[in-house]
Image (cartoon, helix red, strand yellow):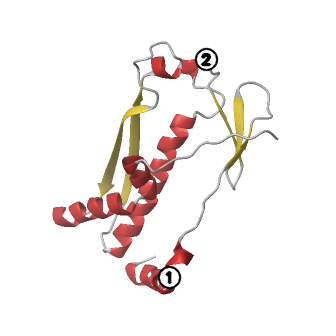
């Protein structure tokens, strides 16, 4: 897909959203079932069933997916798609590339070993490596726009309001 095809594909969508902003607001959903053996949660991904469990650093077997890894994988996926989309739109030819995400966790917090240790990622680092002949100013713009339009990155960075509830079924 080139920039012209991408613009043609997205133009009617953008027009609809400009004309009726409410149509741009969509609720994404995820569902998981805790009705499985062991300490695990089966998550419906829309494509397959993913089974998440404890990380080995908290006593897990390592056979199930770690939700922290899944968060980083979602960041990599979103950032990679956004990078390619932006590169196409601003005509930065990418021969190849990789997206890396790393996050630091202190499992003392997760396990309640140290009440002062944080629960969750203390730091997340996102890195792109691209093979391109584009000039540096275009790469700077590519990075800036990728950061701006990557949904998962912006969600992590700005920490949206989150509500938690529980009901008996």
Asked if labels 1 and 2 touch by Cβ distance under 8 angstroms, the answer is no
Q: Position of residue 131 (x, y in %)?
A: 30, 57
Give the structural element (helix, strand or loop) at label 1. Answer: helix
Position of 1 relative to 35 (above/below)? below
The foreground one among 97 and 68 is 68
Find residue 167 and report its image quarter. top right
In the figure, 49 relative to 12: above or below?
above
Most foreground residue, 136 or 167: 167
Instruction: Tell me: residue 7, above or below residue 72.
Output: below
* Secondary structure of the residue carrying numbered label 2: loop
- Looking at the image, which residue is at 49% across and 53% down? 77
Where residue 147 sits, quadrant-wise, is bottom left
Residue at position x 45%, y 16% in the image: 115
Q: Position of residue 129 (x, y in %)?
A: 32, 50
Q: Nearer the viewer, residue 149 or 24?
A: 24
Circle 1 residue? 9
Between marks 2 and 1 in the image, the one whose residue lies nearer the viewer: 2
Q: Quadrant of the C terminus?
A: top right
* Label 2 sits on residue: 59
Q: CA distance from mark 2 to mark 1?
A: 47 Å
Counting from the top left corner in percent of width and height, residue 124 is at 37, 38
Residue 7 lies, in percent from the top left, at: 42, 82
Is residue 22 shown left or right of residue 3?
right
């Amino acid at each position: 897909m080139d920039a012209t095809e991408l613009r043609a594909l997205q133009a009617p969508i953008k027009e609809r959203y400009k004309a009726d902003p409410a149509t741009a607001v969509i609720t994404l959903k995820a569902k998981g079932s805790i009705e499985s053996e062991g300490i695990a949660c089966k998550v419906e991904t829309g494509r397959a069933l993913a089974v998440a469990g404890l990380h080995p650093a908290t006593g897990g077997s390592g056979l199930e997916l770690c939700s922290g890894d899944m968060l980083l994988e979602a960041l990599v996926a979103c950032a990679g798609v956004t990078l390619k989309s932006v590169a196409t739109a601003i005509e930065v030819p990418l021969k190849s590339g990789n997206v890396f995400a790393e996050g630091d966790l202190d499992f003392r917090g997760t396990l309640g070993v140290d009440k002062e240790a944080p629960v969750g990622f203390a730091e997340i680092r996102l890195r792109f490596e691209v093979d391109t002949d584009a000039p540096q100013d275009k790469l700077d713009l590519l990075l800036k726009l990728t950061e701006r339009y990557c949904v998962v990155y912006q969600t992590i960075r700005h920490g949206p309001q989150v509500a938690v509830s529980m009901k008996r079924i």
